[in-house]
Image: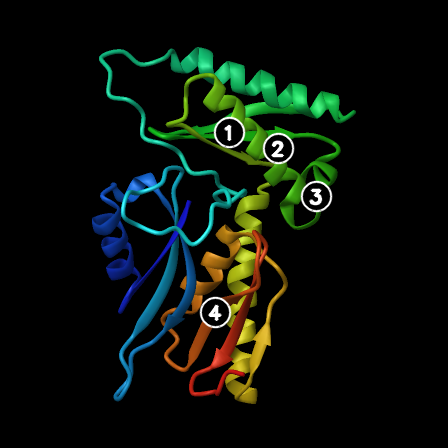
Amino acid sequence: MIYEFEGRTEKEAIDRAAEELGIEKDEFDVEILETQRSGLFKKGHVKIQVHTDSAVPGKTAVSAVSAPVSEPRPRRAPRTASRPDNEGFEQNMVSFVEGLIERMGYEGEVTILYQEESKLGLKIDSEHSSILIGKKGKNLDALQLLANIYAGRQGREDMRIILDSENYRIRREESLVRLAYTVADRVRENRGSILLEPMNPFDRRLIHTTLNDISDVETKSEGDGLYKQVRVYYRGLRRG
């Protein structure tokens, strides 16, 4: 389910969401829809969407679409005295992803990149990495989604699986940050706006947060569906 909240800052909007929904902050995903800096005659404003798996009584959802594909939201693990065997789970995940790659007709080796309390990073080494990553990382995102579904079927809904290959995730973030600053400079120079290519929620949030501290530039997500576009515009520009 998806709910919308507003606040003067991103933190205030997220705090309000947690309070009104009655759930912890780590139990939902946040997507920034719009951010505006405060000024002499204008208060700051941030609009967010909160993605959660369950409906909240007394709260009307905006939509029932699923959570972001690039990083599926982990659920809080049940508090029990015993935990599943992590080592066995990790090896199952490695074998599963290698099996996916093999069924695609390619060879690849999967190794554990890092292990955190609620996150498992897996690295794919293959001569066909460019194909496995796909355009804008869409193939890698699809593999990652399947891996997270499998983890849930293993009883590990609390564990989020992150797939990477050729350090794509880091390179993608660095590229988006550079893009955000370049577009901001063009917008400030032209006193206009620029609409970026469609992006998944994780990439859009990175653009929003990167430009959040630039006083004369604002951002807003536009469009429907999972892959929306971010418009970067000069502050004070009348939006049509």
Name the amino acid type tagged 4: Lys
Q: Quadrant of residue 97?
A: top right
| Residue at the (55%, 60%) spot, across then down | 176
In x, y percent, where is residue 20? 23, 51
Name the amino acid type tagged 2: Leu
For residue 3, above or below residue 28 = below
First in sequence: mark 3 or mark 4? 3
Identify residue for label 2. 143
Front disc: 3 or 4: 4
In x, y percent, where is residue 188? 50, 84
Q: Quadrant of residue 189?
A: bottom right
Identify residue for label 3. 134
Farthest residue in the front direction?
58
Measure the alpha-carbon separation of dots 1 and 2.
9 Å
Helix, strand or loop for disc 3: loop
Measure the alpha-carbon separation of dots 2 and 3.
11 Å
| Residue at the (31%, 25%) spot, across then down | 77
Identify residue for label 4. 220
| Count of numbered marks | 4
Helix, strand or loop for disc 1: helix
For residue 201, above or below residue 182 = above
Name the amino acid type tagged 3: Gly
Measure the alpha-carbon separation of dots 3 and 4.
27 Å
Q: Is residue 155 left or right of residue 104?
A: left
Identify residue for label 1. 148
Q: Quadrant of residue 168?
A: top right
Helix, strand or loop for disc 2: helix
Front disc: 4 or 2: 4
The N terminus lies in quadrant: top left
Disc 3: CA contacts within 10 A as few (<14), some (14-19) or many (>=20)? few
